Image: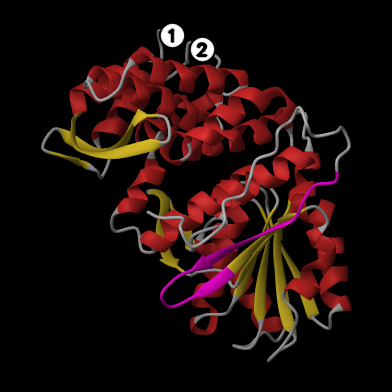
Amino acid sequence: MSETNRQRVCLPDQGALAAGAVPQRFVVPVRLAQHEYDIHVGVGLLDELGKLWPPTMGRRAAVISASTVGGLYADRCLRALQGAGWQTVLLRVPDGEASKTLAQAERLYTGCLEAGLDRSSTVFALGGGVVGDLAGFVAATYMRGLPFVQVPTTLLAQVDASVGGKTAVDLPQGKNLVGVFHQPALVAIDVGTLQTLPDRELQAGMAEIVKHAAIADESMFGWLEKTAERLLERDMALLSPLVARNCQIKAAVVEADPLEKGVRACLNYGHTVGHAVEAGAGEWDLRHGEAVAWGIVAEARLAVRLGLSVPEVADRQEKLLRRLGLIRGPLSLDMDRARQSLMHDKKVVGGAVRLPLVPEIGRFVIQERAPLDELVKALEELATG
């Protein structure tokens, strides 16, 4: 995983940054062997969407969005696209993970057909990770593939889900069981949309940012320790470069491993235990980012237990996650369900599990055979504080 082909985004010194400073704009290139695209980051990009991706071969476009986000931002997107010459249709889906189904995909296919979309058309995904996954899946499979533009509106989607080309829908038996890799033609991140994001959703997105810092950027981790409270106050002059820097980290991983065959496993840091926490949370309605945060805590402690790290490294991660409002403990879980989820993880083979661990902030190792019983102990510790 190398970032030698791009200039690193510099995170500003908050002490030298005047209140009310104008947020910068950034372009992060993603260069894959068979596909290239750019990630644009800044405030006000929704109003420039038609300029960022103008009609060329065809003029028909579908904007796919969920109910809440569509009510907030669809009109701005439609005006921007229509002003550039796009002929648009807005297709809405209900909020939430329940929309990621083959039935909803079929409804969207019908909407695209009725609107006259053909292979020269474009799909725009306006919303969080659910919309990005679903709209990307529809774009990948409608008429054997249309270009699609990611327009993520949640922090989690902006720094993680919108970059990398993973699209999917769920089956009753589990999440993301039907999907395809389909890289976006463009990612347009209007950081201003974070102003309307509920506090808990903003905090949930911070978990992926902490993950990126822990596995790949010690200086960003230290910067987060200095700026945590101001980030939660939604200072756009800080959030814009932070989002861009995280996109750089994700882009470097995707370039090194576009089809998730090797080093991309580092992005699963915190997710092995995190998925078990989600399974055991049940009625407590834990957000994905909150579950990942707990997973980071458990897996950081596991690294110490295995002699790969020292307690200070685990403590720094936990303290930062607490300051960002992601860890409030001890955790209430259906522990039997959580254990079962962990033991049936697809990465478990012969009583051991392959997962990334952090020996020191800013660096990861892939632990090929971490003992499953030790991972279960780390999970159980979460319920006792």
Q: Position of residue 374 (x, y in %)?
A: 22, 21
Q: Nearer the viewer, residue 110 or 231?
A: 231
> Of the numbered discs in the image, which one, if any, rests on residue 385?
1
Specify whether 297 is left or right of 227: left
* Rendered image quadrant of residue 100: bottom right
Q: Nearer the viewer, residue 167 or 67?
A: 167
- Colour mode? secondary structure
Closer to the chain start, of discs 2 and 1, is 2
Q: Identity of the amino acid at label 2?
A: Gly
Q: Nearer the viewer, residue 262 or 140?
A: 262
Please check the rendered image and state whether residue 28 is part of the magenta-colored stretch, yes or no: yes
Disc count in the image? 2
**Which quadrant, please, contains the N terminus?**
bottom left
Whether residue 363 is visible to the viewer of this picture, yes or no, is: yes
- In contact (CB < 8 Å): disc 2 and disc 1: yes
Specify whether 234 is left or right of 94: right
Residue found 29% across the figure and 19% down from its top: 304
Q: Nearer the viewer, residue 4 or 340?
A: 4
Q: Position of residue 130 (x, y in %)?
A: 58, 52
